[in-house]
Image (cartoon, helix red, strand yellow):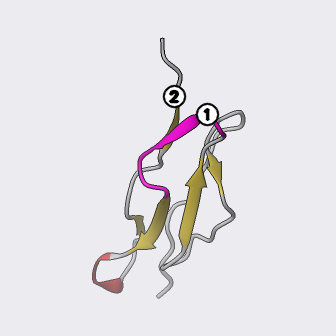
Amino acid sequence: SVINCSKLVVSPGDLLRMSSCGYNFGAQCNFSCPTGYRLNGSSSLKCVAQSDSPPGVWDNRLPTCHGTFCR
């Protein structure tokens, strides 16, 4: 059977940048932030599945970008 993960969506206007990536089992997506922002979370997510059977799940939560400036 085919194992797919849910489609990862980065909102328009979001600072988070996502590389093109697939949604099939074993696919990996990489993330980055613009200069001056730091990534909060994992810089990559991988589509995994328990016991190699559906459904597929991402091995981490979608990261976010945070400004490094002081308030």
Percent x, y of residue 16: 61, 43
65 is higher (above) or lower (below) than 41? above
25 is higher (above) or lower (below) than 42? below
Callout 2, which amino acid? Answer: Thr
Percent x, y of residue 71: 48, 11
Residue 30 part of the magenta-drawn span = no
The residue nearer to you, when weighing 9 against 2, is 9
16 is higher (above) or lower (below) than 66? below
Side (left or right) of 63 relative to 35: left
* Disc 1 target residue: 36
| Image mark for residue 68 | 2
Q: Residue at (47%, 63%) from the top-left corner?
A: 45
| Image mark for residue 67 | none
Q: Residue at (69%, 64%) from the top-left corner?
A: 20
Q: Residue at (65%, 35%) from the top-left corner?
A: 14
Quadrant in the rendering for residue 57 = bottom left
Quadrant in the rendering for residue 55 = bottom left
Q: Which residues are magenta?
A: 35-43
Percent x, y of residue 23: 57, 70
Asked if one can make out residue 6 in the rendered structure from this viewpoint, the answer is yes
Label 1 element class: loop
Label 2 element class: loop
Report how far apart the C-alphas of labels 1 and 2 lie in the structure: 6 Å
Percent x, y of residue 21: 64, 68
Side (left or right) of 24 relative to 17: left
Verify CB contact (< 8 Å) between mark 1 and mark 2. Answer: yes
61 is higher (above) or lower (below) than 66? below
What crowding class fits label 1: few (fewer than 14 Cα within 10 Å), some (14-19), or many (20 or more)?
Answer: few
The residue nearer to you, when weighing 59 against 33, is 33
Callout 1, which amino acid? Answer: Gly
Asked if one can make out residue 8 in the rendered structure from this viewpoint, the answer is no
